[in-house]
Image (spheres, helix red, strand yellow):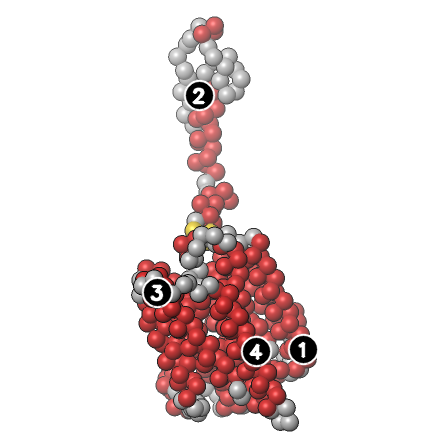
């Protein structure tokens, strides 16, 4: 370790250094020793601060990691503590789980209003940013919840097709949420980069949403033919798949089909059901991501509202799956919401910002309209089907 001595000076000409010594000999040594100690120490916890405080999509990375850690804790609590044993999730337990997730979503809305620091570049006005953010968050949450509602019907069809026992369905939904968290993050990151770089893409989203709403309103119902799914065919062609579900495992070891007796890995129909759930979620993301970006361009608000909606609806599956026919008119309210949001994009970005022909439509009007349309369609559905008997899922 090097230590360079300072040149000799007269004692009365020496000024006190950082050490308090009357001179510089000891101070130079202290500085050199500190530099060498830092090199010997290597990277420490403080060296991670620049990374954690770096900004990604308008927010520091530590905030993204904190949110993902919180969601990870909730998932661990779900599968590791509350539902750590195979069993049928009752409708009442399903409702309680949904109520818990909905309460957390509302509590997070309070965080957005009181604590969150929105990036002004994602908002129309620099005034009242937190008020704008919380309105957009709850509008996005309600919209994503309604869009995810259709997911429940399709998931029920998948479970029926693969004859998934009810005691294993929660396990498939749990791991399906993991995939949804990852894929939504990818889609939203790409969508945010495109939308905020090329604002005109919002007009494409608007046209897509209006078309989707029109097709949902007048296109009728289309039966999903899982046996013709190309991904399912590819998996069956490339992997060994058992004929039946014997336990909750996605893979099991069984003798090789060549008769050698060697134990090899086989996929089970439970794994195929999981893959179909993931594919369905990707397909629904094609609708939901443009819809939420029509509500807000803040990536953090987009992602958090998406994840809370997915968590809530998946937990509510076991209650809604027994009463799917009670919500037969929900699609009409949802289709009108999609058309409304598509028209709102054209109104705000085309007629208001570009042409200056009309006043800007504030976010709270979207929230009110979404509540009225979705709430009205749900209420009308329940009233029209009040004499229908619900059938338990198989």
Tell me how far mark 3 sits from mark 4, CA to CA. 32 Å
Q: Against 346, is 125 above or below? A: above
Q: Secondary structure at mark 2?
A: helix
Reading the image, the residue beneath label 2 is 28
From the top left corner, tell me how far across and down residue 273 is, in percent. Answer: 49, 83
The CA distance from mark 2 to mark 4 is 74 Å
Q: Residues within 10 Å of mark 3 (few under 14, many from 20)?
A: few
Label 3 sits on a secondary structure element that is loop
Find the distance from the CA under tag 3 to the CA under tag 2: 70 Å
Marks 2 and 1, how far apart at CA: 69 Å
Q: Which residue is mark 3?
A: 357
Marking on residue 93: 1
Where disc 1 sits, the SS reads helix
Q: Position of residue 95 (x, y in %)?
A: 65, 77
Q: Give how far across and how far down residue 35 sits, in percent.
A: 44, 31
Residue visible at 66% across and 82% down in the picture: 90
Point 52% across, 55% down: residue: 130
State if disc 1 and disc 2 touch (CB < 8 Å): no
The location of residue 236, given as percent across then percent down, is: 40, 86
Marks counted in the figure total 4
Task: Evaluate if marks 3 and 2 touch, with contact meaning CB atoms under 8 Å apart.
Answer: no
Of badges 3 and 4, the one in the foreground is 3
- The one nearer the camera, 268 or 160, is 160
Residue 190, visible in the rendered structure: no
Q: Which numbered circle lies on residue 299?
A: none
């Amino acid at each position: 370790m090097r230590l360079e001595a300072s040149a000799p000076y007269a004692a009365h000409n020496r000024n006190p250094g950082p050490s308090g010594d009357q001179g510089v000999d000891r101070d130079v040594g202290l500085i050199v020793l500190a530099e060498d100690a830092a090199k010997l120490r290597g990277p420490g916890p403080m060296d991670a601060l620049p990374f954690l405080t770096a900004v990604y999509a308008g927010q520091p990375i530590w905030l993204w990691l904190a949110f993902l850690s919180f969601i990870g804790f909730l998932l661990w609590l779900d599968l590791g503590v509350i539902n750590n044993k195979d069993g049928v999730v009752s409708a009442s337990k399903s409702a309680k789980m949904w109520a818990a997730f909905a309460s957390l979503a509302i509590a997070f809305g309070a965080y957005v209003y009181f604590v969150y620091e929105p990036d002004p570049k994602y908002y129309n006005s620099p005034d009242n940013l937190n008020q704008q953010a919380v309105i957009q968050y709850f509008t996005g949450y309600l919209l994503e919840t309604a869009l995810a509602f259709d997911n429940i019907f399709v998931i029920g069809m998948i479970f029926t097709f693969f004859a998934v026992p009810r005691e294993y369905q929660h396990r498939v939904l749990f791991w399906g949420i993991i995939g949804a968290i990852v894929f939504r993050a990818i889609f939203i990151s790409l969508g945010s980069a495109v939308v905020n770089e090329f604002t005109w893409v919002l007009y494409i989203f608007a046209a897509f949403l209006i078309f989707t709403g029109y097709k949902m309103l007048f296109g009728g119902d289309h039966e999903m033919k899982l046996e013709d799914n190309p991904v399912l065919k590819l998996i069956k062609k490339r992997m060994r798949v058992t004929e039946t579900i014997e336990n909750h495992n996605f893979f099991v070891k069984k003798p090789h089909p060549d008769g050698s007796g060697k134990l090899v890995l086989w996929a089970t129909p439970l794994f195929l059901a999981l893959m179909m759930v993931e594919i369905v979620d990707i397909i629904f993301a094609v609708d939901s991501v443009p819809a939420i970006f029509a509500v807000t361009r803040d990536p953090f608000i987009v992602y958090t509202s998406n994840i809370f909606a997915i968590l809530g609806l998946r937990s509510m599956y076991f209650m809604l799956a027994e009463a799917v026919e009670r919500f037969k008119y929900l699609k009409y309210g949802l289709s009108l919401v999609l058309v409304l949001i598509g028209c709102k994009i054209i109104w705000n970005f085309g007629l208001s910002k570009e042409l200056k022909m009309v006043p800007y439509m504030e976010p709270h009007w979207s929230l009110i309209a979404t509540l009225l349309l979705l709430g009205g369609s749900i209420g009308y559905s329940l009233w029209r089907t009040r004499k229908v008997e619900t059938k338990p899922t198989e």
